[in-house]
Structure formats: C-alpha cells, structure tokens
Amino acid sequence: MRSPAASSGQPRTPGPAGPRGPRLHASRRHELGQSFQDGGEHYDRVRPGYPADSVDWLLPPGAQSAADLGAGTGKFTALLVERGLAVTAVDPSTDMLEQLRKAHPQVNALEGTAEATGLTDSAFDVVSVAQAWHWCEPLAASTEIARILRPHGILGLIWNQLDTSLPWVHRLSRIMHAGDVHKPGFRPVIGPEFEGLERHLTRWEDALTPGDIMELTKSRSYYLRANDATRAKVMANLEWYLHEHLGHAPGETIGLPYMTQTWRAVKVQGTTPR
C-alpha cells in the first residue's frame, strides 16, 4: 500500500430526500450477505486493508476499548489492535472469524451481528463498522451500538471504494460489479442516538497485478452469488480489459486507486440502553 494523502472536513448535509446511496430490502441484504459466510481465507488474502490515517482520525483522545462489528477477517480490527486498544470483534461468519483469530489471537472474537451483538452495556469507547454498514439495518444497528457505547462514545463507519473519478477505474468497477461504489453526495443513514456526523476522505493506491484484480473480483458478492456462466463472462471481460484494452502484462504491478471514506458520529448525551 502506498502512502495515503488525506483530506478531511464536514460535507454538505443533504435534506431528508437527499442522496444516501443504494438502499437494500432486508431480504436482499440478507441474501447478499450470506455470500460471505464461507471463503474467509480467500477474502483475507485478496481484499485491501485500510489506510492508517482512517483509524487515527476516528479515535477520540484517550480511547481504550473498541468493538469492531462486521469485522470479517480483521482488516480494520488490525488497525485498532496496533493502536493498543482492547478490541472485541463481532461477525456472523465463523469462517471469517477463524481467519481473524489466527491473525489476532489477543482479540475477543464473537459471532453476532450489528443489530444483536450480545455485548455488555456501555462497554466501549468506539464502535467501528468497516465495509459492512450496507449489510446492516441501520436504525436497529444504531440502537444496539448506542447501547454498548459509553457516554460520548464514537460510532465509526468506514468504506474502501475504487476511485471511480478516474475513467479507467470507473470502467473497471463496472466490469467487476463493484457495488459498494457510492454516488456523489452519499451520506450513511444512522439513528437518532447519534449526532455530529462528519467525514474524512483518504486517497491511496493498492499495488496489485492483473491476477490479483481478478481474484479480488472473485471476493465480491455479485460474483459469489452468480452462476458459472456469469462468472466465466466476468472473468473473460476482465482478461480483455486488463490485458488487451489497457495493455498490462501478466504479473505487472498496477497501482489500483482507492478512496476510503471514514465517517464518525457521537453518541447523543443522555442516550440510555434499552
């Protein structure tokens, strides 16, 4: 991973009808989320990590404990551990948690969801949800997160997405069916238990080969849920685009541009566990 260049600031707040990104019905959200139940080793190997300044911006002074929900194999968990926090990781996938436990045996890794963590009331300074909020029911998850946060605790929502402001990356994202690329003006939905939502943006590059990009595509929910014919078509389109259209040789290193959006909000004073 190359050194990130970060910028921060509070974005314009859209009105009630403003853009908030794709909304998934609960049944569709569950169906797509189930595609990540297996394949933890592959996911851990091919998915990118997160830039260090994402967690540095997110953490409040003096934070000592964090819960990482939808932790997967521990990509964001690792940053919390590196900063000396006592970390509890929660994910519904036993396969993903197996990879997390191997990499971070000091982390308390538990099965659960953002809507039902099973964690203790008012136990954490920070709760993070990296690359997973779109799989959650945001209002129910907000209520549960407020329950396990201490007064003035921080909710952090993090997304890696391909930097589709670059035309070649935009076309690549379409071929990969990278569904987590947010539209301009995206603002995550959170419950009334939180206030002061603001964003930090990091632009960075991940060094990958064409083969790595193809493996990355195989970790996407669209590919995992597709039939064999659709998977073969996606791979053939990628082969053509990377090698014939863009002219990259097998094994050549490509700097794949990313943007990481880190959002934080503060637990409203006086919010009590339900």
Image (tube, grey):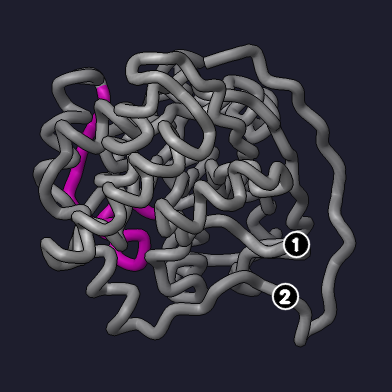
The structure residue drawn at horizontal position 37% and vertical position 34%, both measured from the top left corner, is 213
Q: Residues within 10 Å of mark 1 (few under 14, many from 20)?
A: few
Q: Earlier in the sequence, mark 1 or mark 2?
A: 2
Secondary structure of residue under mark 2:
loop
Q: Amino acid at mark 1?
A: Pro
Q: Nearer the viewer, mark 1 or mark 2?
A: 1
State left or right for residue 154 relative to residue 92. Answer: right
Q: How much space separates mark 1 and mark 2, taking CA atoms?
A: 8 Å
Residue 24 coordinates in the image, percent (x, y) = 44, 79
Instruction: Out of 121 and 50, give the one closest to the viewer.
Output: 50
Residue 86 coordinates in the image, percent (x, y) = 38, 25
Q: Which residue is mark 2?
A: 19
Q: Which mark is residue 240?
A: none
State left or right for residue 251 relative to residue 159. Answer: left
Residue 129 coordinates in the image, percent (x, y) = 46, 48
Residue 105 is one of the magenta-drawn residues: no
The structure residue drawn at horizontal position 41% and vertical position 32%, both measured from the top left corner, is 243
Label the magenta part by its dominant secondary structure.
loop
The structure residue drawn at horizontal position 59% and vertical position 43%, both measured from the top left corner, is 169
